[in-house]
Amino acid sequence: MSTEELVVADIMTSSVVTIDPDSTVYEAAKVMKDRGIGSLVVVDKDGSLVGIITVRDIVYRVVAEGRDPSSTKIVEVMSKNPYYVLDNEPVERAVEIMGSANVGHLPVLDHETFKVVGIVSKRDIVRAAPHLLGRLYSASLRV
């Protein structure tokens, strides 16, 4: 399959790690550390996307502001209404969103149910479609 035919489902990580918005930042940080990942997709009880929390969110919105990670809820500090991509969209669409929004991870939603089915990162793009790397970073420079 050529990279022009690649869709997001072909390169995404389907074992996406999710967390409930009412969990604490401490719990999120522990999961990230234990799994060796830099972000968690925040979903409600129905599995619908409500946000994303990253290491950067924790550092900037919790630690730097002197908040207590064990009592601060994820919903208070997560990025709400995050950018996302559908599983059947071309990889180029993920590159376009990541570059223009300057984000490193995109939740992937099923194109029929709109439930979270994966996550795609810049690392996934580099591995599967390195020829798109220039577009990934040049778009973020235009912002």
Image (spheres, rainbow, N blue to C red):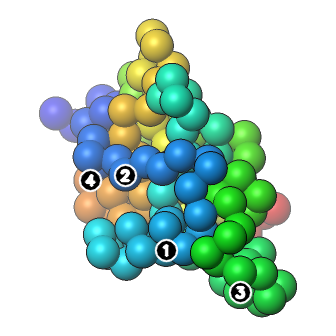
Numbered tag placed on residue 128 in the rendering: 4
Which residue lies under the disc numbered 1?
A: 29
Q: Earlier in the sequence, mark 3 or mark 4?
A: 3
Amino acid type, residue under disc 3 in the picture: Val
Q: Cβ–Cβ below 8 Å for labels 2 and 3?
A: no
Q: Distance between the Cα atoms at labels 1 and 4?
A: 28 Å
State which quarter of the image contains the C terminus. bottom right
Where in the figure is residue 20, as x and y percent of width and height? 53, 46
- Left or right: where does residue 98 sit relative to residue 118? right
**In this view, 115 is above or below 65:** above
Q: Earlier in the sequence, mark 2 or mark 3?
A: 2
Residue visible at 64% across and 38% down? 50
Residue visible at 74% across and 62% down? 77
Amino acid type, residue under disc 2 in the picture: Val
Which residue lies under the disc numbered 3?
A: 63
The mark lying in front, picked from 2 and 1, is: 1
Q: Earlier in the sequence, mark 1 or mark 4?
A: 1
Q: Nearer the viewer, residue 96 or 84?
A: 84
**In this view, 57 is above or below 87:** below
Q: Cβ–Cβ below 8 Å for labels 3 and 4?
A: no
Extreme residue toward the top, this view: 112
The mark lying in front, picked from 1 and 4, is: 1
Where in the figure is residue 26, as x and y percent of width and height? 54, 74
Which residue lies under the disc numbered 2?
A: 17
Extreme residue toward the front, this view: 71
Where in the figure is residue 89, as x and y percent of width and height? 45, 27
Amino acid type, residue under disc 4 in the picture: Ala
Q: Distance between the Cα atoms at labels 2 and 3?
A: 22 Å
